[in-house]
Image: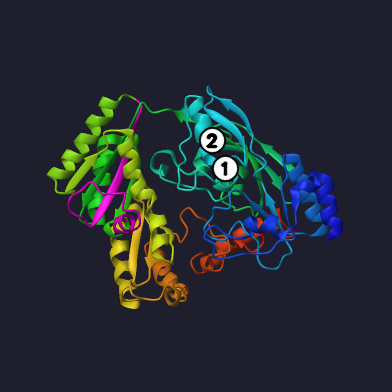
Amino acid sequence: MNEFLDQCRNAIGAAHVLTEAADTAGYLTDWRRRFTGRALAVVKPASTEEVAAIVRLCNQFRVPIVPQGGNTGLVLGSVPDTSGNAIVLSLNRLNKVRAVDTINNTMTVESGCILEQMQNVAAEAGRLFPLSLAAEGSCTIGGNLATNAGGTAVLRYGNMRELCLGLEVVTAQGEVWSGLRGLRKDNTGYDLRDLFIGAEGTLGIITAAVLKLFPQPKAQLTALAAMRTPDDALALLNLAQARCGATLTAFELMSDFCLQLVAKHFPQMRLPFADPHAQYVLLELSDNESEDHANAALEAVIADALEQDVIQDAVVASSIAQSKSLWNLREHIPLAQAEEGKNIKHDISVPISRIGDFIRKTDIALQQTFPGCRLVTFGHLGDGNLHYNVSPPEQGSDDEFIARQDAVNLVVHDSVDSFGGSISAEHGLGALKREEVRRYKSAVEMALMESVKNALDPLGIMNPGKVI
């Protein structure tokens, strides 16, 4: 492989082809630090043309490619296996904002741009880029597109498929498809854009995208409501949508145990209620009319919910600081769970109307099979996506419980399937769920996916071992 690496160095510069262990280590371990792979090299091109040149070399020498953005994924989709045959193709040097068009309400950015920076670029132009998730300070637009990221504002703005108008992609053969058209209507054949979004780098490498922008809301209001059951949360969702319509931006469910963990490991964060409640909902309105209009709508929702005994208490943030405090409770749940110890994560979706039944049925099934396990249930109730996580019994062994992960997954995922849901809502399949998904997809569906993969990547060099 010396000739291959030499040609890579000639193509993009020797300084950007990393082979020393000290230089490559950070690219080989997954976000949760549970798996470390090996790579022939970490290659860091700085332009679409350089990406294409590297892919052509990989074709010539039959070298597998693992595309990588911020490496914040949770399903082993952006790290190589242990064979050491692949290169990691890091896209973090492709970090330019190519254009902002405030009339068309779009921005064209390269795939290595950090999500938080794109939010700031949009804000500086008087616009909103609404994708928001916990890793936004380090995840990249390319990774967001490759996994069809969702986040907290899907309820109003949709996931990355809905936020993207056009793509630039380097194909598995090293050709460049320039589809950076900022069009909201283009009915001229197969939708190649949606084919590459969510494909986790297995069909081609996204190098740039045209993203939708929106007007900055005139008011954003946050409230935390307390209730007895997930069914009450669904009733509140129905009330909020009826009263607020499209201004309802976020609707996040959190169980009491989630917030107990936050309070235990981050004692500076306090719940604004004197007494605990079984469930909580964090909701946010983004109003383009006025703060008074938003306040009136939110107050009406809370008043109706209290009168109908849907909720037991509620607090509305009266300042940006208070709003951040409420959101911090939500965002610190994964951090608190990590502090508590090892856990088994699930990123699932079921039809919104069936979430209450799903939680009840699956909680019982898990307690019967794994007595004492603790359910850390939270997520984006407004779009049917739950992070339905399972922690070991309080006095149990983390390692012994994690050793039973496959059995835990079987209970959860079989339940998800019985409710017509998906075992991956927003994290993707990666290597972690690659085999398991075959249990839940039909032979026809898998054959269609394999046909697409074989047609676009006949050599099988694009992120092998991931998705299918």
Please say whether residue 274 is one of the residues in the magenta stretch: yes
Q: Circle 1 sits on which residue?
A: 141
Q: Which residues are magenta?
A: 259-288
Specify the quadrant that holds the C terminus.
bottom right
Query: Which image quadrant for residue 443?
Result: bottom right
First in residue order: circle 1 vs circle 2: 2
Q: Position of residue 86 (x, y in %)?
A: 72, 60
Q: Residue at x 52, y 43 (%)?
A: 161
Query: Mark 2, residues whose alpha carbon is within 10 Å: few (<14), some, or many (≥20)?
Result: many
Residue 177, magenta (yes or no): no
Q: Residue at x 33, y 34 (%)?
A: 320
Q: Tell me the residue at 26%/44% (across/down).
A: 224
In the displayed structure, 137 sits above or below 73; it is above
75 vs 280, left or right, is right
The residue type indicated by label 1 comes to Ile
Asked whether the beta carbons under mark 1 and mark 2 sit within 8 Å of each other, the answer is yes
Q: Position of residue 158 (x, y in %)?
A: 45, 42
Residue 118, labelled with which disc? 2
Name above or below for residue 76 compared with residue 106.
below
